[in-house]
Amino acid sequence: MREAYIVQAVRTPGCRRNKGAFAQTRPEELLSQALQGVCERAGVDKGEVDDILVGCAFPEAEQGLNVGRVVAQMAKFPDKTCGATFNRFCCSGLEAISLQSLRIMSGWADVCIGAGLESMSIVPMGGNMPRPHPDWAKENPDVYVSMGITAEHVARRYGVTREMQDEFAYHSHMKAANAQKNKLFTEIIPTTATKFVEKNGQMVKTTFVQDYDDGVRADTTIEGLGKLKGAFASANPWVPNQGSVTAGNSSQTTDGSAASLIMSGDAVKRLGLTPIARVVCYAVAGCKSDEMGVGPKYAIPKALEIAGLKIQDVVNNGLFEINEAFASQALYCANELGIGDKSLWLSDSDSRVININGGAIALGHPLGCTGAKLCATLVNNMKKLNKKYGVESMCIGGGMGAAAVFELC
Ligand SMILES: CC(C)(COP(=O)(O)OP(=O)(O)OC[C@H]1O[C@@H](n2cnc3c(N)ncnc32)[C@H](O)[C@@H]1OP(=O)(O)O)[C@@H](O)C(=O)NCCC(=O)NCCS
């Protein structure tokens, strides 16, 4: 097998659903800028790209119709560059990167893009017209259960208290606010966004450039988080309004796009490039759908075993990006994996290796984009901090986890 290398990885900012900067920007425009941005930043001509695979969790309406191919054309890739769309919910973007890496490793392609996209403002979570199978759903309601309820299940079943969740959420915001202040999100490409404004009684399309994640709350306090009400129906129907999962300790619903340019060793040499990281491996692991948040607990060890690594190797000389779908599940998984020690994730800890610049609680979780977004953050941080290994992981609706391992070049 050949090797696959991430040569460049970028992302748009992540912006709040409906309330944020991208609420009126079409998803194709976000993706188009991520695809063009990754080529521009790598200094690679678009004509070199053989295929583009785009992860999207709700690939319909404005982000439907094989958005992967439509946007390849919109972003002015030549006709010979192909495009497709892929869905495995929250890991779709990472799956796109791994499938493109496999294509390169097998010798079927030399230069590919793995990307992710989600406009949660324009296509709601669940899609515009969800149609669960009526008979199957009656007997198997867990398969369609709300993600927030699965987070409540994890909190209740495994004793992740409200206080623990809020502390984790607070540090996510503090890490992200610190990274913004110190301009550490270098993987962001300034992105042109759309806003319709009223002018002389007519709605007129205007544009502006957004270059930061707009969900970060630097003024977050533990006390403030503690005042928020449970956001999801209680897991115990006879105990109303007692949920511990809130708007403050859940991932934010967000719009965004991200892309990684992946190449074979031959292509890297031919184009005279220096890659950032090697794609070592990728694994998915199934779990119960009504506690899908535990997925990373199974997926990370599976990926590490394929890579021939121990979790301590990553703690000693690496970084983790573990998606914060909810504080309850991220914290539970870290504890179960033996990396729950607070020094590994607190914002004021110099030895932190987990979500070092914050996670989805502060930066948002644009579903199908997240896998590609976290990859961009991870490999750029590995390069900046000279960390040998990178592990990316997330839980997935329906009851799965995914994890990938990267090695610094
Ligand atoms: C939990 C959830 C329903 C909350 O939605 P929302 O009400 O639109 O959330 P918002 O981020 O707008 O926050 C609502 C309010 O909570 C409060 N709040 C949120 N974060 C806060 C913080 N860090 N500190 C203090 N208050 C906070 C604010 O009052 C905020 O209102 P404002 O924006 O007007 O200031 C939504 O974020 C969600 O569904 N998250 C999970 C998504 C998911 O399931 N993804 C898939 C995972 S597998």
Image (cartoon, grey):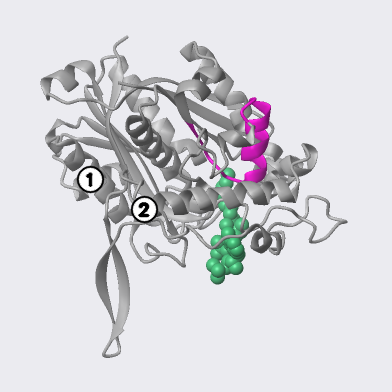
- Identify the residue at image location x=15%, y=39%: 79
Q: Looking at the image, is 305 positioned above or below residue 45?
A: above
Q: Secondary structure at mark 2?
A: loop
Which amino acid, mark 2?
Answer: Pro
Residue 27 to residue 158: above or below: below
Asked whether the viewer can see residue 90, the reply is yes
Query: Which residue is disc 1 drawn over?
Result: 37
Query: Is 48 contained in the magenta span?
Result: no
Q: Quadrant of ligand 1?
A: bottom right
Amino acid type at mark 1: Gly
Quarter of the image with the N terminus is top left
- Residue identifier under label 2: 13
Q: Decide if residue 194 is on the left or right side of residue 150.
A: left
Q: Which quarter of the picture shows residue 333?
A: top right
- Per the rendered image, the range of residues in magenta is 320-339
Residue 52 x/y as whole percent: 28, 35
Taking the image as shown, residue 295 lies to the left or right of residue 354, namely right
- Give coordinates of residue 97: x percent, y percent: 36, 31
Q: Nearer the viewer, residue 164 or 308?
A: 164
Where in the figure is residue 304, as x and y percent of width and height? 52, 17
